Image (cartoon, rainbow, N blue to C red):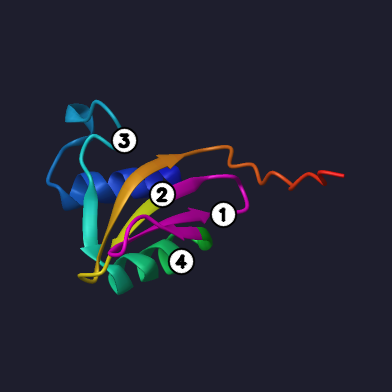
Amino acid sequence: MFRHITGLALIALGATPAAATSPIADILCEPSHTLAQKLSRQFGVTRFARGTQGPDQVMEVWTDESGDWTLVMAYATGKSCIVAMGKNWDKVQAENPA
């Protein structure tokens, strides 16, 4: 999935893979519903967690079974942007403080 989204970002931004220095050198933004459909249908990831970052922004973590993850910033305007991607996502169990 990581390679697919990197390729998608490069195509959408008109860059060639050889010119890219980082898989997230440029941020990919699309309407929220379009980006959510691409992430779930084309890349098989699901929204794992989310949290607010101010009144107009929500951070979302999308993951797949292989451990690839994508961090998406969703805005109140209806636009969402991929801001980070990586591998080896690991769900940490909450510890019992007792």
Q: CA distance from mark 2 to mark 3?
A: 13 Å
Between discs 2 and 4, the one toward the N terminus: 4
Check disc 2: other Cα within 10 Å, few if <14, some if 14-19, many if 20+: some
For the residues bearing labels 1 and 4, Cβ distance under 8 angstroms = no
Res. 81 image quadrant: bottom left
Please give the residue where the numbered disc 1 appears in the rendered image: 64
Q: CA distance from mark 3 to mark 1?
A: 18 Å
Question: Which amino acid type is shown beneath numbered disc 4?
Answer: Ser
Question: Which amino acid type is shown beneath numbered disc 1?
Answer: Asp
Q: CA distance from mark 1 to mark 4?
A: 9 Å
Q: Which residues are magenta?
A: 50-70
Please give the residue where the numbered disc 2 appears in the rendered image: 71
Q: CA distance from mark 2 to mark 4?
A: 14 Å
Please give the residue where the numbered disc 4 appears in the rendered image: 40
For the residues bearing labels 2 and 3, Cβ distance under 8 angstroms = no
| 68 vs 37: above or below | above
**Residue 60 lies within the magenta run:** yes
Between discs 2 and 3, the one toward the N terminus: 3
Between discs 1 and 4, the one toward the N terminus: 4
Residue in the picture at 17% in, 37% down: 16
Q: Nearer the viewer, residue 76 or 67?
A: 76
